[in-house]
């Protein structure tokens, strides 16, 4: 069946708008932090996997970073352990880090890799221990094996990208003697994006973006720079759960990432819409120093 | 301004449909025969130039072939010569081929090159004499320097494509001793597409495509193979002006070109719509031997 | 301190013997199946990791394959499940394959990667799902998600080796729709060695090699070919636990692997001794068709 | 037939003298400005084409630049336009630049390309518009579309040379919005030689070289530097027609071209004699800063 | 001083004739066997060295092969040994082959290398023992260490040529256990030319070429094929000293060398005259199967 | 036969110690100066040749430098000349340098090349004249053609090493006009090692190393730096024959060679023991500035 002319013109408009972005982003590294509902909802999970495959198809280099807090708590409970948190961080004894590692590397990572590889032999799951990707240090003695990112050695990710593969990264790091640590996934995503010199770090969440009033969708901030974000954190204007995410985003752009984005992972194909159209979606965080203009601006 | 959700979903649909074509056609050579109204209407001419630049931007390798019959007649008349045609072919004496060469190489080709190069230093105009691209032979003694394509040596086109340039080809050929001939542009487009191993040969015309009844737009043939086309020509079911075009299209697909297309050059961005959506536009001609399925089919 | 002359001569002898093997094996792929006591004894585990690093240091390309049956049973029991075996194979329901995957990919593999990476950023853990390495098929409906190797796509292993990395492979495979299966590690080691065109497949065990009488160390078979091994299996002369191992070894050499070896993983540095001296250790399995002579023979 | 010894010795002498130049000039870019009688005399035109082919055969990289003033005037007159000159420059309205472009690109360039390509598929004709080669600016409002060279982007010429092709350049340039300008060919030859980092810029003329007294062949200047040439122009010691040529030559050597030469195009094979023998021919212009010694000096 | 026109035309003629040969022979391997007067006459020796350097300068790949019979006899006599010949071959005991090796490798080869290297660091002297170039076998027990060419392994010569060096080859070979043999230099030159796939094998002698009557210079044979040469040898029409030379030449062309030449080394620059002019010099030997036409023929 | 366990452990120890050195020295250039008893004793000569081949086999790049004083004297005497020395240096007239060149290049070099090439086509003999390797200057008018190293142009050695060949260097140099000079081999070895940026310069001698008391083996100096060595020479604490050797060693390390070694060439496989074990053998000379620690230290 042939296309009616009115539809044709609309389509042509979308394409004329999208093609320059496809050209501009060719070869660009995009780190996608993946979690929340997008991971639990089976349909959304499939759609994200499909979008990541499409990004690679048109020449971008996506890197997926994932967390899995609820799944860790779940296995702990099945094994009779009671999760304990201080300031939002899980107290992590030796047995807990073993459980976290099994869940993240041996279950969540596997599920994402499998969802992508339904489209072809594309994804390879790795963790911070592989080829020394993430050197971890202990955050605080009371927290046990909760880690900070001491250093990122992105060689293995560059090598997998060079082979046209899609790295899927579990956020377990290890220290110099091989002890494993569990590290916040937003933090790893930001640090990895910086170490890779990524064009974009995208955080898929289950809210519309950065809201100045959580109850008012109209309070969405479309664009903000790192300094403004710092001021907002200091003023107490952000809910607790958003802080690691926006701090990671601000650090990423301050360390050379082109821009960071908080996107609503519940919108189907939100990755494509953000990357390939003139108006963005969700909240865009920039360094504030070097304003990257959109192609169509 | 952020994008409304309903628009977002529609856009996402266009992109999800288009991206696999962009991947599939990466690196593919597409020969675009350009003429008629699309050339004379200044707005359409700009739009075609812009589309050709977009095709290159997302990794295709467009090659433009052009004619210019009316412009040749015009200069002839200004020089006091009366154009004469036999069976639709211009009788071409030594002075006429000189005029045709000046008009095609020195005027029409230049205008197309300039329209493209407004977007950057991309286009390079060549003719069949350059680096021995088209070896011509005389069609008939009575017609003078009207040529047939004796051989195509596509080296120079491959070299320009390898340098990410857009070749714009005037259809003047020369014989072994350097005598110039004027050759039908549709014929050259088809033969060049075959010699290049092009994925597609696209003929931009000023009608909707192949119509079984010229007065009835609903009689548009969406898809036809080379054998059916031959039968239609033999049965006299085609108007004279369409014959060289469809014969060139049929020859191209018989000689290895993936598919040929007759498109209505008056539709804005018709090239993008044909290449990057599931439903095509105009008439698609296939070899009939190996049916190339659309990605989404 | 300078070296006494008598010691010097002995050392020189070892080196003169070893150097030609180092030259001959340069670039050779060696698959090392690792399990049993060598994995549980912390000192031996360290020594194996160190030897694998030395092999890579002098130019070989080691690939480690591991199992972990006891560790799977252990987590099952902690989660209140009773392991059940039929003909030596674990009955594997959906929950069990999930547990097996967590243990193998998320724990055993991690421990080996960490032990190697104490020496530098060398090892990368992968499983059969990564980049489509192992396509699995169900062995028998009654066994649930116990898999056979339907196909090996060794691309990702070649790519990691090309980057001078040490792949450590967990033996979880997946089918076309992404369902995970647990596969016997000896079988995977043999099939992977064949798919890689490996020079050697080495099975580290906790007995001296192939014994015709399990109670008599003097009954060790130094060298045997695939056909003799088949005869031995058919005659019932092998204990049950040895059968998958020797069958995997025989299949490997029949499919182009230079030789397979059953080595006693309890001997420190047994890998070096086997590879770099004129007399071998343990049992060598050859194809019987093309006898590969030792360098010094 | 065997060679008599006396002839043999003479030949050997020519070769012993020529071979070091052939070695020294291997890979060197030589811009040849071509016009005047050499272009109109059919035999000389053939000889120049043959020499250019020989230069390429032994490893030089010739680039041909041509003008065509008389041919432009001729077509203007046939179209009923009266050529008008101010200070030696043609007043160029829109119609005239269209005519100039047709004549230069569509006729003179074609004739040179055809003459070279009788020897093989070697020459490719381009103009300043192709791939943005020459950015033009208007010289003076009263002169219309008479251009100056605002910038040279020699990429397309380098690319054609890298493919072992011979670029033949028409001296039409265009400005940022695609408007065509006609530019003096001597000026383009000098600027292009400088932009290419050419070893030599050679101007074929129809006099013996630079004469201090036009009526006295013995007044030929063999060698002069750019500063002396400037002084000579200022002192009024040069006839009008020579000024653009010697100014272009002086500019070329001041901008890095090894040397410029005014040669008598009426001497058969004058290019070979200049390039491959110890004594030069015509007038050599040097920068005066870095005296390039001939190999045999 | 400027060139008179009459001289200029003559020179141009030589160049027009020579340039196509320079192009045609670019990269061609030319083996030059060097001996006789050309070696003993200091001026001629310098001229041959200079010509070999010129050949390399314009892109040929010369390989020099030399003998040195008189110099061997000379050192033998100084050491009190009496040279003894059977059928023209030197009886060569262990001491004699030691002397021959010292003279050829340690004196004659050195003198040629030094003469060439006055022009730059170009020549490298090698013998048949280096990198296994020439495997020798004993010709006859009575002759001692007089060798035949059992095999040529031209790798080292190819490697030196690839580095733009000029190999100078002494014709000492060695057998599998390292015993040295003295081999006829004409024989080595022919066999090496064949093994290298040389374009030409040139034998510099001290007569005009192949004469049917040694006392009549007019009896020079300009061109002959291998079969005719065999017939001439069988008919006894050749003097003894010429036989190894013409047999080597005939073998060379039969084994793939383009042509072989017997040239009079006493003519200055005879190499240049043979290679770069339409008429040859001396005697040309062809295979008779595939007649290689001269460029100008 | 299988290996007894106690022997196995000892062997494993040697290998565990050696493998890191093999890795560390991969690609390293090692210059071996060869002379004295090791050259005259046929068995030792074979063993040194074998060791050099083993070094290359495991990836080092050995370069052999040799002298041959006794052999020169021997031929001089056979030719009736009386060797004459001043301050330990041979007075060298034109005839003597001719003899030296024949002996070194045409005999000693050939013997070493042949001994190595029994193992394969590996060695290529060169002298300082080849490709301008060593530019020589006269040491003193009274000494005739006794040379100093004026400059080293190591290109030819690098090229041979790049082709995996073993250069064997005779220490004849030549001056700008091609005159040959005889140069001390220790001096050449040190200067060549420096010019090559060698990792080690090894001098094989026939004593245990540097002894402070020649009659007391216990006085062996294991390690010394260049400054200490200078002091020792100035204090007169070294026998005359040792001075050129230790001066060459000191110069080498001062010019960038990693370390120099005086080793006892009478110990079988002394090269392997020095290079591949934690304790060294003989005397190690370092620059004193940058202490290179042994791998195991």
Image (cartoon, coloured by chain):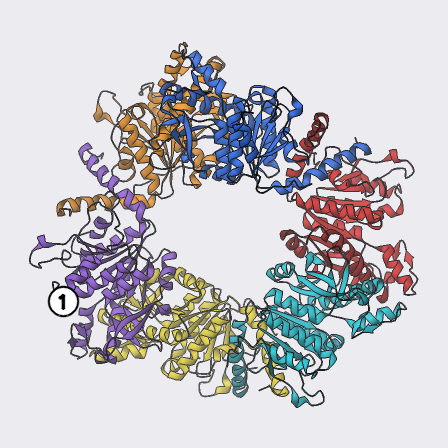
Chain colours: A yellow, B cyan, C purple, D red, E blue, F orange
Which residue is farthest front?
Answer: E235
Q: Check the image and report above or below for D199 versus A89.
A: above
Q: Is residue D249 left or right of residue C21?
A: right
Using the rendered image of the protein, determine whether residue B155 is visible from the camera's viewpoint: yes
Using the rendered image of the protein, determine whether residue E165 is visible from the camera's viewpoint: no
Residue toward you, D296 or E173: E173
Residue toward you, D20 or D96: D20
Quadrant assignment, res F246? top left
Residue denoted by label 1: C240
Q: Check the image and report above or below for F271 versus A237.
A: above
Label 1's element? helix
Marks counted in the figure total 1
Name the quadrant of the C terminus of chain E.
Answer: top right
Name the quadrant of the N terminus of chain E.
Answer: top right
Residue F184 picture location, percent across and down: 41, 22
Badge 1 crowding class, 10 Å Cα cut-off, few under 14, some 14 to 19, many 20 or more, is few
Residue B199 picture location, percent across and down: 58, 70
Residue C244 picture location, percent across and down: 20, 66
Quadrant assignment, res D145? bottom right
Residue E215 picture location, percent across and down: 63, 19
Residue at image point 35% right, 30% down: E178
Q: Chain for mark 1?
A: C
Residue toward you, C213 or C264: C213
């Amino acid at each position: 069946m042939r296309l009616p002319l009115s539809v044709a013109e609309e389509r042509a408009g979308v394409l004329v708008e999208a093609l320059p972005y496809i050209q501009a982003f060719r070869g660009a590294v995009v780190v996608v932090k993946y979690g929340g509902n997008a991971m639990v909802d089976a349909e959304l999970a499939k759609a994200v996997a499909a979008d990541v495959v499409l990004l690679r198809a048109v020449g971008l280099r996506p890197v997926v970073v994932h967390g899995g807090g609820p799944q860790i708590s779940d296995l702990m409970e099945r094994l009779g352990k009671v999760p304990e948190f201080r300031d939002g961080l899980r107290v992590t004894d030796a047995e807990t880090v073993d459980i976290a590692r099994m869940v993240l590397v041996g279950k969540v990572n596997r599920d994402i890799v499998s969802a992508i590889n339904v489209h072809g032999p594309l994804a390879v799951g790795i963790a911070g221990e592989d080829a020394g990707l993430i050197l971890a240090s202990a955050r605080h003695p009371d927290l046990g094996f909760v880690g900070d990112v001491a250093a990122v050695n992105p060689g293995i990710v560059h090598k997998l990208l060079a082979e046209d593969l899609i790295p899927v990264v579990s956020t377990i790091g290890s220290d110099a003697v091989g002890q494993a640590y569990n590290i916040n996934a937003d933090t790893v995503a930001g640090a990895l994006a910086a170490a890779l010199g990524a064009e974009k770090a995208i955080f898929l969440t289950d809210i519309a973006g950065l809201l100045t009033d959580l109850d008012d969708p109209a309070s969405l901030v479309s664009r903000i720079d790192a300094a403004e974000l710092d001021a907002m954190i200091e003023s107490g204007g952000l809910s607790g759960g958003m802080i690691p995410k926006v701090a990671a985003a601000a650090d990423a752009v301050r360390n050379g990432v082109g821009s960071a984005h908080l996107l609503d992972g519940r919108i189907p194909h939100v990755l494509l819409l953000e990357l390939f159209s003139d108006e963005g979606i969700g909240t865009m965080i920039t360094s504030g120093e070097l304003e990257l203009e959109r192609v169509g601006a």
